[in-house]
Image (cartoon, rainbow, N blue to C red):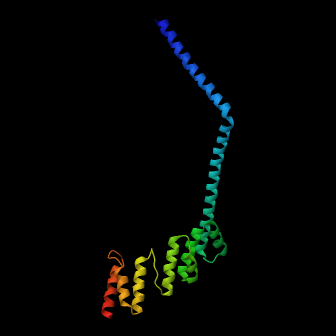
Amino acid sequence: MSIKDDVNYVKKELSGDEKILESAFKIEEIYKKYKLLIWTLAIALLLFFVGKVAMEAMHEKKLDEANSAFLTLQENAEDKDALSELKEKNPALFEFFSYAQAVKKQDSKALATLMHSKNEVIADSSKYISATLEGKSTDSKLYKEMALFQAAYLAIKAGDTQTAKEKLELIGEGSSLSTLALLLKHSTIKAK
């Protein structure tokens, strides 16, 4: 029995080795058949990852240069070279810097230009600040309650207390301006 068992064991081992050899031959056939495609895919993947790393490195360099220009502008806002570099390397940061400078200098022309920004926050803020500087009322998504309060104040100055009350009613009780709106509403009632 033991010889029979040994023979069966050897047969199983040989059939396992045969299967491994058979798989190796199949892989070799597939490789020979699709060698060009396999190498093309391998090279394409290698180029993709090398390209991705290179693009990320260039993007990081561009951001570093923009940040350096921004830091220079923090020290000297009139540096023309830093302004042009910031505008070229990071237009969004350039718009933010331009907005901050326009508000600081109360520059209506710069704010009027920034009203057309693709950045909705800068566009809306520029629109609101520009209207405030000109003593006009405007609609604003970011400064909704402030715009309503300002419109009510301007209506009171114009003698239109009814419009002022309507604008003040639109300011919700949860707003930080609700107390001021209530005081202004009461003062318009007494003034009438």
Reply above or below: 126 against 29.
Answer: below
Q: Residue furthest right?
A: 36
Answer whether residue 111 is visible to the viewer in this image: yes
Residue drawn at 58 percent across, 78 percent down: 113
Residue 37 at x, y percent in the picture: 66, 38
Residue 180 shows in the view? no
Q: In the rendered view, does 109 fall on the left or right side of 149?
A: right
Task: Tell whether 29 sits left or right of 4.
Answer: right
Location of residue 84 in the rendering, given as x and y in whole percent from the top left corner = 65, 72
Decide: is 49 above or below 116.
Answer: above
What residue is at 52 percent from the left and 9 percent from the top?
Answer: 7
Which image quarter holds the C terminus? bottom left
Q: Position of residue 152 (x, y in %)?
A: 39, 85
Where residue 60 sits, quadrant-wise, is bottom right
Looking at the image, which residue is at 33% across and 90% down?
188
Which residue is rendered at x = 40% and y = 87% of the image?
Answer: 153
* Residue 141 found in image quarter: bottom left
Q: Is residue 49 above or below residue 101?
A: above
In the image shown, does 80 or 127 lie closer to the viewer?
A: 127
